Every structure is written in C-alpha cells, then in structure tokens.
Amino acid sequence: MQSTMMASPLLVPHMTERAAKLFPSVEVVSVLPNGTRHRSTLGDLHRRSRQLAGALQAAGIIKGDRVATLLWNEREHLEAYFGIPVSGGVLHALNMRLHTQDLAHVVAHAKDRFLIVADVLLPIYEQLREFVQFERVFVVDRAGEKLPEGAESYEAFLASADNTFTPPELSEYDPAAICYTSGTTGKPKGVVYSHRSICLHALCTSLPDQLSFSRFETVCPISSMFHVNAWGFPFAGVMAGSKIVLPGRNLQPEALLDLMDQEQVTLSAAVPTVWMGMLNALETQPGRWKLSPRLRIAMGGAACAESLVRRFDALGIHVIHAWGMTETGPVATVSSLKPEMTTWSNDDRYAQRARQGMALPFIDLRAVNDEGECPWDGETTGELEIRGPWVAAGYHGIEDSPQWTADGWLRTGDVVTIDPEGYIKITDRVKDLIKSGGEWISSVDLENTLIGHHAVREAAVIAVPHPKWQERPLAVIILRDGACVDAGELRSFLELNFARWQVPDAFVFVEELPHTSTGKLLKTKLRHDFRDWQWEPA
C-alpha cells in the first residue's frame, strides 16, 4: 500500500518562519562585550537571518559551502545559526579555545569559504590568518575600530542584501552545520549535521520528559554555541517560541547569576564546572539572587555527582542530567524519573537522577562486553554503542573509521551499566579506566564521591604506573576556598563507599586542574604530568 502522507521536508528555515508568524514579539536578549544587553525579537531574528542568507547568496555562496563563525553566544551567532542554512550553506562554528594549529586544521579540513568574526576575537583571527585564507571576512564591529585589511563590516554586509533573495531548494538530508570534536585523542574530526537531524533532535529534546522547551520558557544556553550547537538549545528554543537569553563572553558565576535573576531564566545548560562555580556563589551569598522558582538546569559533558544534584535541590533548582557527544548530535539520553520511582526512598531517587538517564525517542543503545555480547536481562555492563537519526554515520572526509561497528553502531568509548529500567550510568571512559592488579577501578565513581566531601571543590582521579600493581589511582584535588583537609581524612571518607584497594594511594592538592576547550577534565595532560610519580615504599 502506498503512503498518502505529504513528503514535507524537515528544514531548519521552517523554525524561524514559524517563530516570525506566531511569536514575532518574543524577546531575544544578548549580552554585549561591554556588559549591556541588546534586546530584539524572534521577528527580528527571522528578518536579519534572511538578510544574511540574501547577502551570502549575492556573494556567490552555493549549496554545501561552509561559513565559519568566531563568535560568542550572542545575537549575531543566532542569526548565523539560521541564516547560513537558509542560504544553503553549512554553519561551522569555530571553537575559539582550540590551539591555533588545531583551528587552522579544522578550517582547512572543512574548506571554510567565508568567516564571520566578532571584533573582540580579532586577535584569534590574526593568528589564524597566517595559516588559512578565507575568501571574505565579515567583522561584527561594535567598537568602531579600524577593520583588518581585507575585512568587511558585518552590518554593512547585511545591509547590502536586496529584496530579491530566493531560497534555494533544500533537501532535509542536505548538510546544515558541521562541528569538530575537541581533539583530545588526535586531530579534531568533523561531524556533519543535516537539516533533518537538527529538526528531529530539536523535536525530541523538547518533549516533556526530556528538556521540555516551550513558549512559556526563558532559555539561556550557557554551553558554547561553538560546541555541538550549544546542545541544540538555540534551535529548540526558537522552534518552541521561547524567550532566548544569550550570555555573551562573561561566564563568571556572579555575572551569569545576575543575568539569570534579572531575565528570570527557566531553562539553561552548561558543563558541571560552570555549574559548580555558580553553586558555590549561591551557597556563599544566600539571598543575593532571586532566581525563577521554575529554573531547571541541564548538566552534561561529564558525569554529574549525586552531591551536586542534592545541593542544587536544596536551593530549589532542579538538575536535569543529560549525556551526548559531538557524534550524537548531541543529546542522546536524559535522566528523568518514571512515575513509580517517585515512591522510592530519597537516596534511591537521587542515585537514579545522577545516572545519565534513558535514551531519547528513536535512539537505540546497547552495552557490549568483552565477549562482544550485549545482553539486557537485568543489569548489563560494557562499552556503550548507539545509533539513531541524529547520530553520525561517519566523520567528514574520513572513510572506514573504527569508531563504527560493521553493523552500523557508533562506539562511544564510554563504559556504562544499563540497569533493568533502561537507565545508563557511565562508569568511565575506556581510556580512563584504572586496572590495578587485574581488577578495574572507576575513576568517575571516585571523583563523584570526592566532590561530595565538604572541603573538595573539584577532583580528578587518574591511573599512574605502579611497579607491583600495574596501575594505581592517584587523586588530584582542588579544595574549596578556605577549606582544609588532609589525605588521611579523604581516604577515610572514600572507604565508607569503596573497598580499600580501590581507594587512591596518594592525594595531590593543586590550585587548578586542566580542562579541554569544552570544560571537560583533560586527563591526558594529568597522566602526562604525573607519569613519573614515585610511589612511597609499601
């Protein structure tokens, strides 16, 4: 029997078209580099993104051309998110925190044709231009300074667009955006997102049991718009008709809390390190900020400690733990309780919420063990593999990557337990597991427990070579301001929940820990820094 449904494509441009028709006066608030706030609307976003598309078309863009951006979470970046795909181009948000050589690699690998850059980020562009060449460069020039040689004003470029723009015919399988991995294990690799994958991701993350975007929300993506499309928040927020609040470049805890207070943000997203800074500010300055009683915060990018969930709950802020990767579009699982779990004990509910959660609709998961099997008869443990309509099938320009199985599943590199309810818990990265005397130790479980100690602000646990046991865990600790604790107390604290052989043999106290450009602990550097660690004789 032949289908009688319309073959209507899922396209990014439809999001702003709908918003302009149904929610034209809903605000878009953007924090400028000088700290002031620019206010516009979703109607303005639609108009200006079409202007950008028209100007790009007049500049000769053809379907599939890549347009790079060097921008913070700001109004012009939101315009690029929609204007570039409308033109048939592919949005390539550059990670400004990458080393210049890595940045040059991704620009050359993606074959970026044009660049849109904020004036405050011109120093990065100046370093980059020694290694790559863009056909045209458009500067968001708020400061009114002289533009670099060959560069053009972004506003003048938009103004050059006439009224003759005719959108190109697009397929939902056409590329709309490309993001590169952070490059912690080799050169950054590109993942291309189609119009279809972005639309389906926005629809599914918007569902009530997931992140629940709606026209009643005020959405603030703190997660960088240059990293996996800010977890899809800009797309889902505009699609739903939400008020959008863009925090700009000042991500200090007090500045973010001021913004969330004054704009009454109800839904936000960031990595745990950002939330930990804000949590410390809230706890040390009680009563200073009047945050929305409806505030929900999405936390991802690293495993979420149960203690963080409890501390935020005590402040009336609901934590939503989510998991994903650049390769998974990015959100693939969200942790929300099933109805019957509301009757569980307090401890059991918190333990469940701290898991990475269940797969979103249309996402399939499996845990593959050492024998290559993936049973799900009760609890199962193994490397997490995933497939779905917004999961990459390969890397841009790379054939036959070993990260995909012969039957088409993505190997994530995360070791997980899947419980009988279908919730995953990441126990470690494959490369971060510690094998001591033939037994495995989870660095993530140790780190999350350490963060629950009143004196610990952040913790990393790494494997260090050991002459007898092959590897032993070493804990690297940042203490909270004014806190004091010794290794013996931390060891005793861990022994409440871990066998003695699982507890780190040494604790090192430092002022800061290395992080990737996206806020994750950079354990490769820690392992390098402590590779010659000398264990004291037993």
Image (spheres, grey):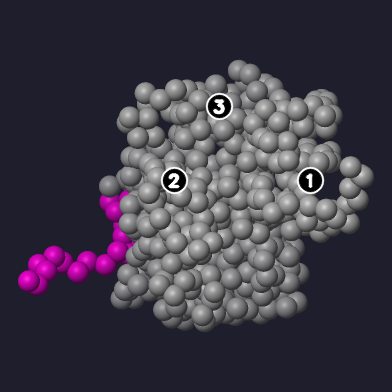
Q: Which residue is mark 2?
A: 379
Question: How crowded is the residue under tag 2: few (<14 C-alpha within 10 Å), some, or many (20+)?
Answer: some
Q: Earlier in the sequence, mark 3 or mark 1?
A: 3
User: Element at badge 2?
Assistant: loop
Splitting the image into 4 quarters, where does residue 467 fall?
bottom right
| Amino acid identity at mark 2 | Glu
Magenta segment range?
1-21
Q: Nearer the viewer, residue 324 or 278?
A: 324
| Amino acid identity at mark 1 | Leu
Splitting the image into 4 quarters, where does residue 210 fall?
top left
Q: Residue at x 61, y 58 (%)?
A: 430
Question: How crowded is the residue under tag 1: few (<14 C-alpha within 10 Å), some, or many (20+)?
Answer: many
Q: Which residue is mark 3?
A: 310
Picture disc at residue 474: 1
Question: Is residue 12 shown in magenta?
Answer: yes
In front: label 3 or label 1: 1
Q: Give the CA distance from mark 3 to mark 1.
A: 26 Å
Q: Nearer the viewer, residue 225 or 348?
A: 348
